[in-house]
Every structure is written in structure tokens, then in C-alpha cells.
Image (tube, rainbow, N blue to C red):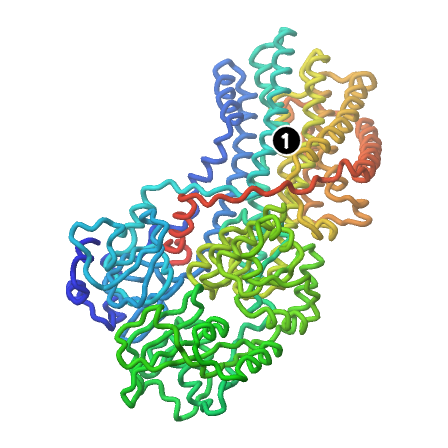
Amino acid sequence: MRETAVRRSADVLTMLSSAPDGLATAEADARRARVGPNVLRERRARPWRVLGRQVRSPILILLFVTAVVSTFLGEAANAVIIGIILAASIGLGFVSEYRAERTADALHDRIRHTVIARRDGAPTEIDVTDLVPGDVIALCTGTVVPADMRLLEAHNLACDESIVTGESVPTTKATQPADHDAGIADLTSCVLMGTVVQSGSGTAVVVATGARTEFGRIAAGLATAQTQTGFQRGLGRFSMLLLEVALTLTTVIFVANVLLHRPILDALLFSLAIAVGITPQLLPAVVSTSLAAGTRALAKRRVLVKRLVCIEDLGDMDILVTDKTGTLTEGRISFTRALPADPATDPDELQLLGLLATEADYATTPHTIVGLNPLDAALWDAARPASARPETYRRVDLLAFDHERRRTTVLADTPAGERIVVTKGSPEEVMGACSHIPAGARAILDGEYADGARVVAVATKSAPQLQNLTIGDEDGLSLMGFLVFLDRPKPDARASLDELARLGITVKIATGDNAVVAQKVLADLGFVSGGTLTGSEIDALGDDALRRAASTATIFARVSPEQKARIIRLLRRSGRGVGFLGDGVNDALALHQADIGISVETATDVAKDAADVLLLDKDLGVLADGVIEGRRIFANTIKYVLMGTSSNFGNMFSASVASVVLPFLPMLPGQILLNNLLYDSGQLAIPSDRVDPEQLRAPSHWDIGFIRRFMLLFGPISSLFDFATFALMMFVFHAAEGEFQAGWFIESVATQTLIIFAIRTHRIPFVRSRPSAGLTITSLAVVAIGVWLPYSPVSGLLGFQPLPALFFLALVGMMVAYLVCVEAAKGWFFARPAQQPAPQPPIVARMRRYQRRVHRRSARFAAPSPAQTR
């Protein structure tokens, strides 16, 4: 990189066999074949990594070792049973998680990151991974630099290079060669891959791509572990709860059995089986299956999730802060008319001045609007009078738009040879730089605002001696008038707002537009506003006062990027789950601050990079579908957790007591593991289960206290019926060891499995809440398999003996009584205010660590999965 930084730009073009007009397509293809694509990593599900996660459990590893030891001690049958069960459990988890990763790969392949390159002499939108050395790229505010490049032109260009150099202050760029001894942070003639254009514009030629770039070397040598979402942190807390219970039970059981002089190996195997039995082994598989199914469903609704677990955070949202353009309005901006501030000004001249003050290259024909902001694109798309001929003007210099100045300024020569400065942008900012404003101008502007129009102001002045523009030259202007644009409210926007309200989501508008315009849009939609805060009012408030004001306000108008981020941060501090929907350069800070950052496929590079979720259509109705899907997945995950922990805890507690009281083990270790595998396998249908409407009306959160209370109530109920089964087998049927174990095995499988239908809903099962067909079929199939096993050809290997027919009559009676008890307990439990899930605790600000930033940024330079390239 330094070799090109110290050379003149013309010499670099010669060295790369390129030109200011870029490469021919055929030449670019040939170079890509030689040097490879511009990628830093591949998107590919790796089966060995997934398998490694399945066998990483210490308990499973210990069981495997114990099975090996059993083989050497002559317990081959027990070892085979444990081995088969472990293989089946690991296999089910592997298949589910691997399919989920393949789903994530497919979603990533649908997210494209593009750049404007000159190919065959014309600006062309291409994928960043297709860039090669010698390509000439256009840079503008918000561009994530797609490769290491040498600047050819620079207009007030500054880049945020903190991801590469660590410097927080933007670096000013210029075309002059850098010093020979310059460090990486001082290569002012170059722009580096992964950095962001903070302001200004320019063109540059690619000199290095992929892993040969400075950023590529950082990404390759850095461990990029992702920070956890709220859902993942909840899973971690739940796992700790299970670990505490499992350690307590297994220790007590092992010590008790040793004191009773049982064989140490049997005691160890039984204790480990209890530990595995109390753990919902397939929880990762159930979660992965749920997330994969949810992402596929959202993809059909044109919602792409960058990471599967972000779906849960989407469902957790209860405040949405969004811009109004494209969400409440159609997003199809059209230029309507030019309004002179003075009757002496010709509207056609005003429109021409507006065209000059854009970043379009009007010296070339035909004109292109690729890469322009929506307002400028609409202006160039509009019909214009024959006298408005911008190609007859010569642009001398340009100050590109940025979110602080909120205006674009050009220095241009007229056909008559006069040199002028033209400024176009926010009316308040432009008028603040004017020394002459016609008397009726403010009344004209207020009238357009009241009608809900989007307005930009145009001002000019003569500058015969000026050679280059600086920000200080944007003063002493004369206001020429206003360009008026129309963006109609969406016909279905009110329905989308109502749907979000039904989901318990408060919608707030953060816009750079005028407050009156935003209020007019909401009024046209019949939406009641809770009040408006402007940027200046926000700056005047301290954090506590702003947090209180922001909680009730609906509109934040004329806000800067820093103000948006501050609002998001303070709303989160109130304990709310905050989502932010934005698509511009000035939205990136807020996207990073939100619990769930949402952007659109057509957004700027830096906004897409910061977002967790991408909408292929900027539609609040689609977003509501995403929220519903996120909440459905969380509800189904919690179903599995509650069912698994309560029934598993009850059965393992029963086994613990029985192992001390009975002269033999109530279930062999292999039988316990098989019981757990059958039960868990039936739960793999939970992701497809229906969810009651009331479970979707508000976000749900991990509440370990709630899960513990649920387990300690419903677990003992399960144990009561286990003890009844023990008494039945011992005192009524006088069962031998094999019969006893077979009887409890069947009762345990039946109660654990059928209780699903009671615990899955707060309502009366089947009558007011119907489970999905898949869950019903798999649950009944598991019970049928459990009943069949003592009579199957493998019953002897498993240690089972057939049972008398009267046992099954007694079993039916106990099952009916059990379900009645559970329904009664469920009604009592959910009626108590103290047993309701606790509100979400205040959210700790999410820390965006350096590794996470590199991982997110490098994702745009990822090769598609093999399925996409075939």
C-alpha cells in the first residue's frame, strides 16, 4: 500500500494498466480469474464444527468414557445401549443445527453489498466481491471503502479509519502523494478497506483486494467471537440453573448409593444418567430448529436476519424508532415544482440551479443518477424546460452533503464565463447562510411545511476570484427559492401502525425533516402524537429530563445522528426493548445503540453494516410479521424449557428417592437415557406448534425465577404419580426388577410426553388451544414406542420384562388423574400475581467490541456459499 501512496495518481494508474475511465468488463473478469475475488471469508456451514459443539458437553464426554470403561469391565450390553443413545442424541442435535446453519448461509447469500465502479467507461453498480485491482470507484458520504485504493480525486474527503488505525478522529484525505516514511495512519493519499467515508466525495483506483488489504490482514489474524444477544444471555443463565440442580442431585445420589454398598460403576453410571436426564439435551437443537424455521418464514415475507438469534431480539422489541420516509410514506419522492422566493426569479432558472448543486456528473451525457440521494435523483428524473441545460456549465469544485452542514455547495462556471457559488439543502441551514432573503420567503416555506411537502432551499452568489471551495465560502448568499418534493403517506401505513400497537409496540418518529411536516404526515394517517421534541430542545435537556420527555414524545424532528443515538440509549436505560429502523449514513450510530438494528436492502453501506435485520421492503407491516415470528419462536422455546425442566426434575427426583429405598435401581442408566431421548425427540416438533394470541401481545423475557418456581411446583406433582406407580408395581403387581423398570419407564414416557398438551398453553388444551398436527403426531408416536419397547425384540437387551394387561388400565386412570391435577395446579399458578413472569430488568448498554466491529464489517466481503456459486 505504501508503494502506491507515495506515487502520483497518474503513475499508479499506469502501474495498474488502468485509466480514469476504469477497466473493460472483459479485462476485469480476466484479472479476477488471476487474483481471485475480493473476499475475506467464506459463508459455509462446516459440519465438523457443528458436530464439535454437540460433543462438547462435559457430561456427554464423561458418559462416553464411562461406556468405554464398562466395556472393559464386562458390562458390554450397558455400554452398547449408552453408546447408541448418545449417538442418536448427538445425531439429532447435529442434523438440526447443521440445517439451521445452512439456512443462515442461504440468507447471507441474499444480502448484496454493491459499489459504483467505472466499467466500459460508464458508472456501473457491481458487487464488492467482484472488484479487482485497477477498478476505478466513486466514493461518497457513507460508503464503506471496498478495497485498499489510491485516490484520483478528492473533494473535502474525510474517512473514519478507526477500525484499521484506532484513530477516533476522521482523517482528511487528498490526492498529493504521502511521505515515504508515513505510517498506516498517515497514508492520506489512500483509502483503506473497511473504513467509512465520513464526509466529502472522490474517486479512487483499487490497488489491493481481499486478504492482501490492511483490513484483510486484521480480519484474518483476529478472533471474531460475536457478543451475545439478550436471548443467548438468558440461555446461559438457564444452563447455570440446570447445572446447579444436576450437580446437587448427582452428588447426593452417588454418595447415597456408595454408602448402600452398591457397585461403584453402577452408582456412577446411574448418577450420570440422572444428570443427563434432568437436562433438556436437545434444547440447542430445538432452539436452532425454531430459529431456522422462523428465518425461512421471515425470508418469505422478505425479511432477512443476519444472525439467527437476532430473531428473538426482534420479538423482544416494544419501542420502534423510525424515519417516516418509506415507512409512513411511500418513499417514492417526486419533484413537483420550483417556488422562487422573489417574483423576479425565473422558476426554470431555480430548477437549473438545483440541478447544478448535486453530486451528479452533469458534464457527461447521458446523465446518471446512480448513487445520488433520493431528493437529487428525483430532481434529475423530473421533466425540465429546454432552457435548463446543466451540461453547459463547468463544475470547478464541490462540497458534498454531510449531516452537520445539511447542504451541498458547488463552484461552477456559467456558459457566459461567470463564476458562481450555488448551495442547496435544508431551508433552515441555507437561509442561515444567506445575507439576503426576500420578504415573503418564510411565509412560502411555512405554507409548504403545513401542506406536508419536503422542501430544499437554493441560494447563490457571485465568486469571480474563487478557485477552491471551503466551508467558510458558504456565507453571504442570496436566497433564490425552494424546490418542493412530494412523498405521499402510504395507504396501508395506518393499518401497520395499528398492528404494531396490538403487539404492544410504541412507534416513534426520528427525522431530519421539519417538525411541522412530520406532524402533518401523522395527522393525515389519523395517528395521535404524544408530542414533538426538536434537536435544539433535545440539546437543552439533561439525560434524566430527556429520558422522561422521550418516553412520551412521538416525534423527534431536525435531529442529528448523535441526538438519535442518545435518544435510543436513554430509552433503553428505561428498561425498554428498543428497535431502530434507519437507512441513511446518519442512522448508523443509532443502529449500533439499539437492541435490534433494522435497515433496508437499498440503505447506505454503513447503515446495512450496522443493522441486525434487513427488510427487502421498507414496510412496517412486514416488520410486524417479523416481531410476531420472533415472539412465536420465544414462546415455543419457553414451552420446551418449562415442560422439560418440570417433568425431568420430577422424574429424576423420583429416581433419586427410589434408588435409595428400593433394593435395586428403579431404572437402569441406559433406560433413563433412552427415556430422555424419546421424550426429547418428540419435542423437536415444538417449533411448528401454534401459539396462543395472548402470548404475542407483548414481549416475553427470560425469567429464571419463574422457571424455577414452575419446576418446583409441577416437578413434585410428577413425582407423586411416580410414587403411586412404584406402590402399584411393588404392592399390587409384586413386580420383579425388569417388570418394575418397564412399568415406570412406560408411565414416565406417557406422563412426560402427554403433559406437553397441558403445559403448552394457559388455556384448556384441545378445547380452547389446539396443538399443531406435527406435535400431536410425534407425541403420540413417542408414547406408542414407549409402550412397545418392553414387548419388542430388544426388550431383553434393555432389561425390560412384559407387563400384565391390568397395568395399562391402571395407567390410563393415573394419566387422567395426573392431567386433572396439572390443570388445577396450572390455573392456581397463573392466577397468582407473584407467579407471573417478572418485568424485564433494565438493559445494560450493549458493548460493541472491536472484534464484533471487525466481524460485522468483514461480513460484506464474504464469498457466497457453494450452493450459490454452482
- Whether 80 is drawn above or below 413: the answer is above
Residue at 59% from the left image edge and 33% from the top image edge:
237
Image quarter where the N terminus lies is bottom left
**Does the rendering let one see residue 548?**
yes
Amino acid type, residue under disc 1 in the picture = Asn
Q: How many marks?
A: 1
Rendered position, 164 above or below 415: above
Q: Is residue 312 visible?
A: no
Q: Residue at x 74, y 38 (%)?
A: 754
Query: Which residue was labeled with disc 1?
Result: 676
The residue carrying pointer 1 sits among few (fewer than 14), some (14 to 19) or many (20 or more) residues within 10 Å by Cα, namely: many
Q: Is residue 382 left or right of residue 366?
A: right
The front one of 248 and 186 is 186
Q: Nearer the viewer, residue 415 or 312?
A: 415
| Residue drawn 61% across the image and 29% down it | 242
x then y, percent, for residue 134: 23, 64
